[in-house]
Image (cartoon, grey):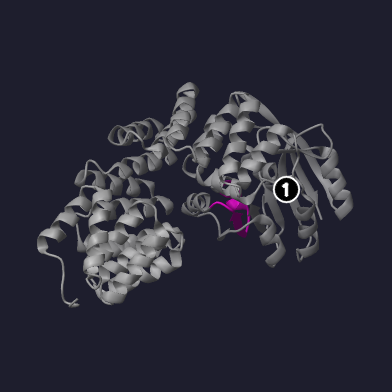
């Protein structure tokens, strides 16, 4: 057969029509026939590869796309299609490389810029991701998906108002773009606009009645609004639509936990682990319900918890839960230094900078450390820290040069059960004498204990034992009302230990 032979224009248009109308079985049959009859014509291979990608046959799609590139090495669309498949497979770095090759071959390829942007976002390169999404919009100002992708990046950068604006632009361009309603709801929810978020999720479900992710997100919002029965219904609808939805099982477990239906909660958590065995945060929650005390909460649990809470943290904790530990600690440690500086302070687990706001005026140098990038975004905007670092506390204490007068942990040890390494590292690695200041949830039980809440409590006897073991002097202890939970105050301990 002559290599220059190709299917008729009518056949190509018919195949394209099947594809665009989502008649994938008919499209696949025709594309298979086309690749058989015209094996050296790239169009059939490209369409067949796209059908395989859309029907979750990703490895086969990748092979077909590679065949398309063999036939047409400068086909920018084929590189874009390979990149799309690699991204679906989680091979993000390879996807990035292929998007860049597509752009190299076609410098005004708006779709590739947009997809490269979202891929870079998934790789954590958020500033570069934003630039590529904006380049896509510059090339194609009416590109709805580019605005949606830009919204995702802006959300992850903590710029929630801008993210909402970008999602709304996507929706204006395409009122049926269901993902943008769901994403809009996510930004509204993270910004504390729960009623608006509920409406956005409901709109996405109205447009796509089998949208499991939107049902899950709606349920989480209803739960935060105290509509617990409705939340349960919607979690179960998400699971019915997507029986392998590990996150929905975990979230349902959390709701059942809150409703004191512990056996049902454990069952739901176990199902989440069955579906996603590396779900470390769910193991932690099961241990809490079973009364099994572990050494610390998993990093992923802490990071996810506070990333989801960052933009409404201050309002919720200070105003609703009456949390005043940062103010109390600041008042105590600054009271004897009215005419001099406290020196250098390390705020470990600094969160949104509540303690930094209180203590900044009394010290020469203030550094903050936290696992949550979004909490640090909020802290940075307060402009009270000399330096902020996203890192695990123990990793920081193990690796950095320590030369601080104060090490402060406000409401942090509730996620660290075993405090041995904290006491050991500070005492052994700091260059000078100093003070360790912290709060705990107080308990009369021995040592430390993982509560049903998923948080740790510590006894005074345990802290005294650590002081004895590592040669600290416990110079101050008082019981305080830490914060409210279910309209009752949690009893806490406030400690100052000198070394």
Q: Is residue 224 above or below residue 144?
A: above
Farthest-out residue, front = 1
Magenta residues, start to end = 356-372
Does residue 109 lie above or below 357 as drawn? below
Label 1 crowding class (10 Å Cα cut-off): few <14, some 14-19, many 20+?
A: some
178 sits left or right of 191 in the view: left
Give residue 130's quadrant in the image: bottom left
Q: Residue at x 43, y 68 (%)?
A: 94
Q: Where is residue 301 in the image (x, y as percent from the top left)?
A: 60, 46
Number of numbered discs present? 1
SS at circle 1? strand
Q: Can residue 135 be seen in this view?
A: no
Left or right: where 261 falls relative to 238 = right
Which of the image's four quarters has the C terminus? bottom right
The residue that mark 1 highlights is: 437
* Rendered residue at 27%/65% (across/down): 45
Between 416 and 260, the one nearer to me in the picture: 260
Q: Answer with the quarter of the image where residue 431 lies.
A: bottom right
Residue 488's x, y, as percent? 64, 24
Residue 77, how many percent across, how many down?
A: 26, 67
Residue 318: say if magenta.
Answer: no
Nearest the eye: 286 or 130: 286
Q: Name the image quarter holding residue 492.
A: top right
């Amino acid at each position: 057969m002559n290599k220059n032979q190709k299917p008729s224009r009518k056949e190509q248009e018919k195949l394209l029509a099947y594809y665009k109308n989502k008649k994938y079985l008919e499209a696949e049959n025709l594309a298979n026939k086309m690749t058989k009859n015209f094996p050296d014509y790239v169009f059939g291979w490209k369409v067949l590869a796209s059908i395989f990608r859309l029907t979750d046959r990703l490895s086969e799609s990748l092979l077909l796309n590679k065949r398309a590139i063999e036939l047409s090495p400068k086909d920018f669309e084929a590189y874009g299609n390979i990149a799309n498949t690699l991204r679906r497979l989680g091979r993000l770095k390879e996807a990035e490389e292929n998007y860049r090759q597509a752009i190299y071959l076609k410098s005004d390829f708006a779709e590739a810029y947009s997809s490269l942007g979202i891929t870079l976002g998934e790789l954590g390169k958020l500033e570069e991701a934003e630039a590529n999404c904006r380049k896509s919009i510059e090339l194609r100002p009416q590109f709805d998906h580019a605005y949606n992708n830009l919204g995702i990046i802006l959300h992850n950068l903590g710029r929630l108002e801008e993210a909402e604006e970008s999602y709304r632009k996507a929706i204006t361009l395409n009122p049926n773009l269901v993902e943008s309603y769901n994403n809009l709801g996510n930004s509204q929810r993270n910004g504390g606009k729960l009623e608006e978020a509920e409406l956005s999720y409901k709109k996405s479900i109205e447009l796509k009645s089998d949208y499991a992710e939107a049902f899950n997100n709606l349920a989480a919002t209803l739960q935060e609004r105290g509509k617990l029965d409705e939340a349960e219904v919607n979690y179960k609808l998400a699971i019915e639509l997507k029986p392998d939805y590990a996150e929905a099982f975990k979230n349902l477990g959390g709701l059942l936990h809150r409703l004191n239906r512990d056996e049902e909660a454990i069952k739901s958590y176990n199902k989440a682990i069955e579906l996603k065995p590396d779900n470390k945060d769910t193991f932690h929650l099961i241990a809490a319900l079973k009364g099994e005390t572990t050494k610390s909460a998993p990093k992923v649990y802490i990071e996810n918890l506070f990333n989801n809470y960052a933009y409404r943290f201050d309002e919720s904790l200070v105003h609703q839960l009456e949390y005043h530990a940062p103010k109390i600690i600041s008042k105590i440690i600054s009271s004897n230094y009215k005419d001099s500086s406290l020196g250098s302070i390390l705020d470990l687990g600094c969160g949104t900078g509540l303690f930094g706001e209180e203590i900044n005026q009394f010290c020469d140098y203030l550094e903050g450390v936290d696992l949550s990038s979004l909490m640090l975004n909020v802290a940075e905007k307060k402009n009270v820290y000399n330096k902020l670092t996203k890192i695990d506390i123990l990793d920081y204490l193990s690796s950095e040069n320590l030369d601080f007068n104060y090490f402060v942990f406000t409401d942090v040890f509730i996620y660290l059960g075993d405090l041995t390494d904290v006491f050991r590292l500070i005492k052994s690695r700091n260059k000078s004498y100093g003070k360790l200041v912290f709060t705990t949830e107080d308990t009369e039980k021995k040592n430390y204990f993982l509560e049903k809440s998923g948080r740790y409590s510590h006894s005074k006897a345990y802290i005294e034992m650590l002081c004895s073991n590592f040669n600290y002097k416990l110079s101050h202890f008082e019981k305080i009302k830490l914060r409210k939970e279910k309209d009752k105050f949690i009893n806490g301990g406030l400690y100052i230990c000198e070394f």
